Image: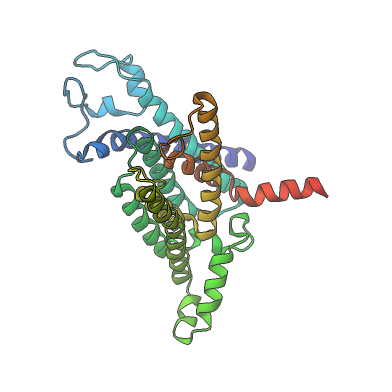
Amino acid sequence: MQFTENISLLSYFFVSSFAFGCIVGSFLNVVVWRLPRGESLCHPPSHCPRCGHMIRAWENIPILSWLVLRRRCSACHLPISWHYPAGEAAVGLLYAGIFWHLLRGGLPLAVLPGYFWLAGAVLSAARIDAEKYIIPNKITYSGMLAAFLLALVFPKGRLILHRESLQATNGLFFQEVLEKLNHWEPLAGFLQHSSAAAALDCVLGMLIGGSMLALFAVAGKLLCYKQKRESEAVGYGDVKFLAMIGAFLGADAAVYILLGGAMLGFLFGLIKWARKKNIENIFSSLPFAPFLAVPVLFWLLVGNWFYLFWHFFYDKMQ
């Protein structure tokens, strides 16, 4: 009987995570469409982009409304792209996967708000960057603020404070800074509070994540200036994007994610060069946010993938 109740409860949470993800996915469709065009996310209400028909509540249910309306607008009867329900379902599956990772790893529920927010922010920023080559400040700035507030309200959501967790392994930056600051008497007692330590982890991740790409941005700009080229190696939108990621996941995670994103971007650039045989502007013309998004989402679904890969290959070598 207890086993059946546990299965029912888990099923409820999985379905709830999927449904919530679909709702967020529907909102992200609005974000991806409106933010690059400088439009408000609140006004006007959702409407058909072709005929302007205001979408009623029952027409705005993720996935189901698209199926009930037979993939067409109820007013002008023009087709509604399958990209909308596909995006909603993808975010739903992602949120269900994040919940499964939390359950499998025995992580606290306080992790979910930050992980869900980061997943939505990363997906929307990556989609916009892939299409428009921009990362809106509204996504990155609101993400940094949300990460800081969540660190204060839900300090247990910062996995660096759980030393037994795989995600907290190799928290070198945080542990080193915390040790140094604990030697300063005015802060020693203050940093014993979990909210203060969580806020420190957030700010440190933001600074390390942003500063790493900022150095590349400055160096790339100087190189392009010397070569009299107008393009930039790294945009400052990417700098703020990685700073936001670091704010949620911490400094060490930002380093690993930058490494993973750089490797993916390099491999993609090589494939692109092999097909076109033209090395000029191959890498500078690539939007970087989608390549950073992949290791971020992998981190949210399986944890510290760098640590897992390292131990996998280490065990194979023994």
Query: Seen in the image, is 107 located left or right of residue 115?
Result: right
Q: Looking at the picture, how far across and down is residue 170, in whole percent?
A: 62, 61
| In this view, 230 is above or below 108 | above
Quarter of the image with the N terminus is top right
What is the count of numbered marks?
A: 0
Look at 41% across and 26% down and name the residue there: 86
As drawn, the residue found furthest toward the right would be 318
Residue 14 lies, in percent from the top left, at 51, 38
| Front residue of this view, candidates 298 and 7 | 298
Question: Would you say residue 261 is visible in this rendering?
Answer: yes
User: Where is residue 152, by image quadrant?
Assistant: bottom left
Camera-side residue: 8 or 168?
168
Residue shown at the point (34%, 58%) measured from the top left: 145
The vertical placement of 34 against 181, above or below, is above
Q: Is residue 27 above or below residue 171?
A: above
The answer to which of 29 and 24 lies nearer the viewer is 29
* Residue 29 x/y as whole percent: 32, 33
From this view, report whether residue 237 is shown above or below residue 63.
Answer: below
Q: Residue at image x 53%, y 55%?
A: 255
Residue 200, percent from left and from top: 45, 68
Q: Residue furthest front?
A: 227
Q: What residue is shown at x 45% (from left), y 31% (from top)?
A: 90
**121 and 251: which is toward the camera:** 251
Q: Horizontally, is 276 left or right of 53 in the view?
A: right
